[in-house]
Image (spheres, rainbow, N blue to C red):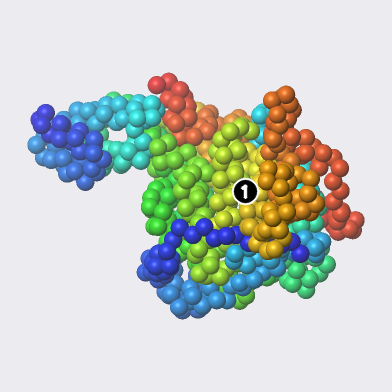
Amino acid sequence: MRRGVKGRGFGVLTEEQIREIHHGVLQVLETKGVKIENKDVLDLLRENGCTVDFEKQIVQIPGYLVEECIKKAPSCIRLSGRNKENDIIMESGRSYFGEGCGSMNVLEYGNTLRKPVKGDLEKAAKLGDALPNIDHVWGLYSLPDDPLLGLHELDAVISNTTKHCCILNWYGRDLVSRQIEMIKLVAGGEKELRKKHLVTLYSEPTSPLIFGKDFTEAIIEWSNYNQPVIWYPAQKPGATSPVTLAGTLIQGFAESLGGNVIVQLNNPGNPFIAGVSPLTMDLRTGMNTYFSVETLLIQSAAGQMGELYRTPIFGTGGCTNSYYLDTQMGVEAALSLYGSAMSRQTLIHDIGMVGAGDAGSLELVTLCDELIGMIKRVEKGIETNEETLALDIIEKMDYGEDFLRLAHTRKHMKDEHFLPQLLKRIGMKDRKEENTTISTAHKRTEKLLKEHEVEPLPQDVKKRITEIIEESKVK
Amino acid sequence: MNDLIEDIRKALGVYDGEKCEELAKKALEIKINPIEVIGALRKDLEELGKKFSEGEVFLIDLMGAADAMNSALTVLKPAIEEMGGAEKRGKIVIATVEGDIHDIGKSIVGSMMVSAGFEVMDLGRDVPNEKIIETLKKEKPDLVGVSAMLTTTKEKQKELVELLKKEGLREGVKVMVGGAPVTEEWKSKIGADGYGEDAVDAVNVAKKLLSL
């Protein structure tokens, strides 16, 4: 089992504020309600005590139901990989890291952009499988002109990693049912499909307060099979949610927990990952961002709400607004990654996303792998015991003597000091392009893609998956 | 008369839509030329748009101003039409395609188009192509812009172009497409006229297409 990182909990909200926000959430759901463009779901909610205006498609969800469903949502979810050793445990306070999804361009090492092909999703998955600190694997890229994108994405990811997989694209019940079929093949049957959670689906409401038809259908279909779902509002403060961060948190969590109500009523105990996107819009220009200072605040607060609800919280980190492998990328990816981990977000994704989501960079994914290593070291903290207090060492040493030769130094160096491979410290004489972090990250990326081997899917499973895709094309 | 135009310009300057609406009604009452009123407001809005492109004015200000402008326009439009219409700046119909409910991007584009002096009719979200065609026949705009956020719903943009051809309307209107999964290549592939990567780009492309 992969252990992830237990975050330190950088909490910006006080206990009182957490309560205030939760009360706001209940108020919004109970009084304002959400618009749900799906008659089956409206019926389901009505049957369970909600006030429904079928004509306007508005549902008001009473507070007791919201809280009941929070309790029903499992606090501890095992997400599996094809290799059981790669299983991860979703529980509040423990963080796991994965790449982004859905970008429409590949940012290559030389800072050129090109359109992705299926092979790029496969590479991204393979890289995620190879990197030691990536815990769940996503495709990073999109194939926007391919109507079977959802099937290709799933195929690319599940074939190229034995870690837990996550996917973005479904669109339409027809496609979702084929995806379920594919996962069933990998799991080994219907029973195994329900028990093993091999793939998590990402879906989202449309802020403010609309649950779109297809999006809602997807989480219903997915939870019909007890599959884990993420329901992640991507509200932009000042554009599709209140400009104030507190108001954004309230609206966002209202949408998030509204989704949980649907999922729990449909399948009590269905794995559900809550949360709100911390990404904002630059209100000066209308540009969407993949990092801002507000991101750090929202991440922190979202993590705290997750502690209150004891549900896993979806997180965002390791991404940037920059379209280049440059300073901005380094700063933003590091801050967002560190922020999400310190905020104790559970399933942290979006590693490798650049250009505010327009592109994906494999080099950035590799760089973030090292950053996660650093985060893990911070989490480990400072050990205090007889050995580490080193009083007898200090006692024994002569005044002015060096510690480099000591057995004690050799013994503890690797535990106490993180040894970066990419963020190198070199001297003046070695100052050259090929020793820069990004150059080293590129070399490491290439090496891993070349040398890493993924245990392939069983031949008959892979064959049948390919057939399903072909059959879908014929339609 | 100058006082009222001064006042309504001031109201626009602080993005007070209610005040603009009130003063527009007053203008009609005291028989001030509505075309002059709108003309003055349009100039101010264009000035604002210029400042926006220079980074001096923010998007939220522009959206506020466009809203205030629309409040005045709604009141004055019937009177303007009676007089034979205002200076032709370009009439645009915008919509988010059927099956798609994302419209923040389109709303931003709409407001920026208003700031650039266009007359904008926003049909909202989840708009079937049939409704768009119906509107085009009735309103006869110079340009129609359709937005899609999902890889699946952008297909509707392709369908719209085909429908326009079928109905014999294609030549009479410029078609622009936009949205997250939309690209320059997609625009060319489906035979649309313009694509804007973001709202600012969209306005510039629209201006070019309408030779403004």
Q: Is residue A446 above or below residue A216?
A: above
> Which quadrant does the C terminus of chain B fall into?
top left
Residue A341 percent across, percent down from the top left: 59, 55
Q: Is residue B31 visible?
A: yes
Residue at horizontal 68%, vertical 46%?
A399
**Residue neighbourhood size for the residue with mark 1, other residues' Cα within 10 Å, grouped as few (<14), some (14–19), many (≥20):** many
Q: Quadrant of residue A96?
A: bottom right
Q: Nearer the viewer, residue B183 or B173?
A: B183
Q: Chain of mark 1?
A: A
Q: Nearer the viewer, residue A241 or B22?
A: A241
Q: On the rendered structure, is B195 left or right of A430?
A: left
Question: Identity of the amino acid at label 1?
Answer: Asp
**Tag count in the figure?**
1
Instruction: Report the residue that reaches farthest toward the top.
Output: B211
Q: Is residue A239 above or below residue B142?
A: below
Residue at horizontal 41%, vertical 47%?
A239
Q: Is residue A297 above or below residue A185?
A: above
Q: Quadrant of residue A275?
A: bottom right
Say which residue label 1 marks. A350
Per the image, label 1 sits on a secondary structure element best described as strand
Q: On the rendered structure, is A20 left or right of A96?
A: left
Q: Quadrant of residue B55?
A: top left
Q: On the rendered structure, is B82 left or right of A125?
A: left
Residue A161 percent across, percent down from the top left: 79, 53
Residue B171 percent across, percent down from the top left: 50, 28
